[in-house]
Image: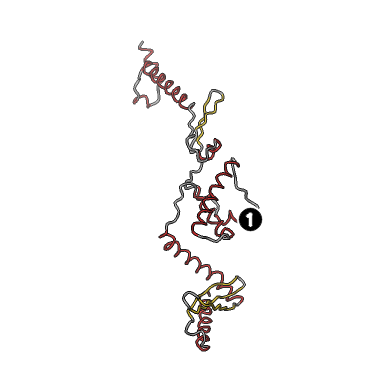
Amino acid sequence: MTSENQSSTSSKQDIAWKYCIDMGKAHVREEIREYMEKKCQNKKEAEVVYDFDDVDNFGDDEDDEVVEVGICVRKSGNNTSKVSNKQKGIKGPIDMFFTPPPEQVMKSRKDGKMKQPSINEACKKQIREKACMELSNWFFDVGLAFDAPNYDSFTIATEAVAQCGTCFKPPTYQEIRVPFLIKEVKATDEMVKQVHHEQWAKYGCSIMSDGWRDSVAYKGIINFLVNSPKGSIFIKSIDASDIVKNVEQLFIILDDMVEEVVRRMSLRW
């Protein structure tokens, strides 16, 4: 017996054995039994299929494919089980890097290079019809012109909203009239400086004036615009009710307008 212990001790040359505790064969069998029970329990849980069928917006069974949030599917083969998770309509930080800009999407659709992907065309047609109906009702409610959808900005706006996914929080009255308006004014001023002012200095420009009578306020209004190869840009509007028949005052106003255009071109360079 002593020789067996000595041979067993001599065979364990690893220094880690000094810090190990011999649990015995009974303890090892108990751990194996617990491991096998846990493995069987996990296998049974993997066989359960989770599906969210309660969400039905249009009363069609095919909608489950579009509105489902998560689904676990078990695939069996060679006595193995595999669980896969599928999430639709849920966006994360990585989507910011792979979502194309709305302007690029609009251009690709016009050029015929992009086709809107669809899983179920019949279901997608119903969803689009409902969205278009709600947009049309909004047009009718606020009294927008029927040709408003012909503007590229409308297509860009709808694409940007679609990229936000579900539960998009629309801008409030205060956000539109203050922060977003200020940002758009700054962006427009920067665009005019970078594009139109350069064209004015390079190719020259023409100052145009448009006079009209406000029948409500009984005022004579003069609008000033600058035309160049890039197009016409509105500069400002003045009340000319008191000077509309005064040639000298009109000349002074036109001269000031020329000076302002020259100043803007000089600031560009």
User: Along the line of sight, which residue is nearer the eye, 18 or 41?
Assistant: 41
Horizontal placement of 39 versus 207: left or right? Answer: left
Q: Classify 10 Å Cα crowding around label 1: few (below 14), some (14-19), many (20 and above).
A: few
**x%, y% of residue 56?**
50, 38
Residue extending furthest toward the bottom: 248
Above or below residue 155? Residue 261 is below
Residue extending furthest toward the top: 1
Horizontal placement of 43 versus 150: left or right? Answer: left
**x%, y% of residue 125?**
59, 44
Q: For the N terminus, which image quadrant?
A: top left
Name the kind of residue labelled 1 in the image: Lys
Residue extending furthest toward the right: 112
User: Along the line of sight, which residue is nearer the eye, 68 or 243?
Assistant: 243
Horizontal placement of 112 versus 47: left or right? Answer: right
Q: How many marks?
A: 1
Q: Residue at x 50, y 31 (%)?
A: 83
Element under label 1?
A: helix
**x%, y% of residue 210?**
56, 77
User: Along the line of sight, which residue is nearer the eye, 161 or 95?
Assistant: 161
* Residue that carries the numbered disc 1 in the rendered image: 110
Snapshot colouring: secondary structure
Q: Residue at x 57, y 59 (%)?
A: 146
Above or below residue 262? Residue 64 is above
Horizontal placement of 110 versus 86: left or right? Answer: right
Q: Residue at x 35, y 19 (%)?
A: 23
**x%, y% of residue 94?**
49, 47
Q: Residue at x 49, y 29 (%)?
A: 49
Examine the image and state in which quarter residue 41 appears: top left
